[in-house]
């Protein structure tokens, strides 16, 4: 079934359509990738993912991201992570992409590899490294990898330092996963280069102490990231946009000062990245192999993102505990972001985009809501207004 919703005339900029390369989203609101730990052991997406993500399409989001999806089995965070390392994993994701599109959302997916942060328990089992008790209930640990043989922290497994050939194989795995994502019908793909995961580990002087061509200097440490970007772009259709998640927290902990980050983003742009997904938390210093932890909040770092946008020309997606639609609108209107992504707030309120539309440009006809809901909501409105008026008169 197709969806006939479109932007209302005179709508606030946040809820106007936006073009990314050759595709358009109905508004500038995206649902962030959020791991659900609910795939089967083969990394196949389940009915949980279909229903979970479908809520956000019905809720009016312009873009809906599938969670971070592993490019190889070792790259999973937990046993319940989705994968795209095998063609058999395409079909259930194609079902999700088709469903999202049929209900008006641009289907998007994030590709990732957790590196030394892999082989974890799910949240409901503690989210620490897998151990013998986990193995006894059928979820054993697996060997993790990283740029160097440095564990995340005390009590975490020591990763195997990747050889040059293994690094090249991983670059190819990212490209193959991008090909599968295109085959599944996604219109936007994001590379996870943040949050202390494998790409981020290569970028960081804390996690990457190599002295070969994949480490040492800033140029050496960013080589893996740029090779992945180029490999993915080569397999991803030219008319479809490509996004990159970056940790702005790196500006705090010495991983990547602003001038160096600008140079890196320019290199990503030149490699074919169209959109920078600017995360506000989880710099490499949050999970150090050594050194002090760097305290930080989750609020979106609008000024830093605006500087990156100004100095590189790349489009920015704001991420970081965005709750108030007026705040989201201001980020876009002030040129601090081109899109705004929400995560936890969408779990609390899957209709956040539609509620944002009502807050910014009230519509008594509920024209942006699913047509199956509009009549009921229009009938509800005067009853709700009367109930509110009655409560106020009794107060």
Image (cartoon, grey):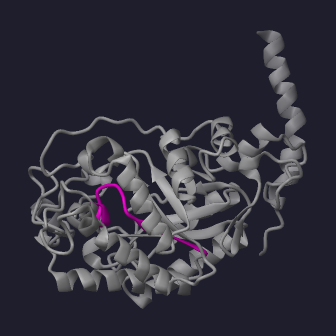
Point out residue 72 in the picture as x, y percentages from the top left corner.
Answer: 31, 79
- The residue at the point 36 percent across, 68 percent down is 81
- The residue at the point 82 percent across, 61 percent down is 6
Q: Split into 4 quadrants, where in the image is the C terminus? A: top right
Can residue 51 be seen? yes
Q: Split into 4 quadrants, where in the image is the N terminus? A: bottom right
- When the figure is inspected, residue 303 is found, relative to residue 155, above or below; the finding is above
Instruction: Farthest residue to the top: give it.
Output: 395
Point out residue 5 in the picture as x, y percentages from the top left corner.
Answer: 82, 62
Instruction: Farthest residue to the bottom: give it.
Output: 87
Was residue 189 drawn as part of the magenta stretch in this picture?
yes
Whether residue 239 sits left or right of residue 271 in the image: it is right
Can residue 342 be seen? no
Whether residue 337 sits left or right of residue 163 in the image: it is right
Point out residue 311 in the picture as x, y percentages from the top left corner.
Answer: 52, 53
In the image, 192 versus 250, the foreground residue is 250
Point out residue 313 in the picture as x, y percentages from the top left corner.
Answer: 57, 58
Q: How many marks?
A: 0
- The residue at the point 75 percent across, 59 percent down is 17
- The residue at the point 9 percent across, 49 percent down is 154
In the image, 281 versus 144, the foreground residue is 281
In the image, 152 versus 254, the foreground residue is 254
Q: Which contiguous range is marked in magenta? A: 187-200
Q: Quadrant of residue 226?
A: bottom left
Q: Quadrant of residue 197?
A: bottom left
Was residue 255 drawn as part of the magenta stretch in this picture?
no
């Amino acid at each position: 079934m197709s969806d006939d919703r479109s932007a209302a005339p005179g709508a606030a900029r946040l809820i106007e359509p936006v073009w990314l390369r050759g595709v358009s989203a109905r508004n500038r609101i995206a649902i962030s990738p959020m791991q659900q730990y609910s795939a089967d052991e083969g990394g196949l997406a389940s009915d949980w993912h279909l229903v979970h993500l479908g809520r956000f399409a019905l809720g009016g989001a312009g873009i809906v991201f599938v969670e971070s999806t592993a490019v190889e089995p070792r790259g999973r965070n937990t046993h319940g992570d989705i994968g795209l390392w095998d063609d058999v994993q395409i079909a259930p994701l194609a079902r999700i992409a088709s469903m999202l599109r049929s209900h008006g959302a641009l289907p998007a997916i994030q590709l990732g590899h957790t590196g030394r942060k892999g082989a974890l328990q799910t949240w409901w089992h503690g989210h620490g490294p897998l151990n013998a008790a986990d193995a006894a209930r059928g979820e054993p640990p697996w060997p993790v990898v990283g740029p160097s043989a440095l564990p995340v922290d005390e009590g975490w497994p020591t990763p195997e330092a990747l050889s040059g050939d293994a690094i090249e194989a991983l670059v190819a795995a990212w490209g193959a996963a991008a090909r599968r994502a295109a085959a599944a019908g996604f219109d936007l793909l994001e590379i996870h280069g943040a949050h202390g995961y494998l790409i981020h580990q290569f970028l960081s002087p804390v996690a990457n102490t190599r002295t070969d061509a994949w480490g040492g200097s800033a140029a050496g440490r960013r080589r893996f990231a740029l090779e992945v970007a180029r490999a993915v772009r080569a397999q991803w259709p030219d008319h479809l946009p490509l996004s990159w998640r970056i940790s702005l927290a790196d500006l705090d902990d010495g991983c990547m000062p602003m001038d160096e980050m600008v140079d890196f983003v320019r290199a990503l742009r030149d490699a074919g990245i169209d959109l920078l997904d600017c995360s506000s938390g989880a710099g490499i210093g949050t999970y150090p192999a050594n050194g002090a932890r760097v305290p930080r909040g989750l609020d979106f770092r609008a000024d830093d993102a605006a500087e990156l946008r100004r100095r590189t020309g790349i489009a920015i997606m704001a991420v970081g505990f965005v709750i108030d639609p007026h705040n989201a609108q201001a980020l876009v209107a002030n040129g601090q972001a081109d899109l705004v992504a929400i995560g936890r707030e969408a779990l609390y309120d899957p209709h956040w985009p539609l509620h944002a539309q009502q807050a910014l440009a009230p519509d008594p006809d509920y024209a942006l809501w699913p047509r199956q809901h509009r009549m009921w909501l229009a009938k509800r409105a005067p009853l709700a207004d009367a109930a509110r008026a009655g409560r106020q008169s009794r107060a």
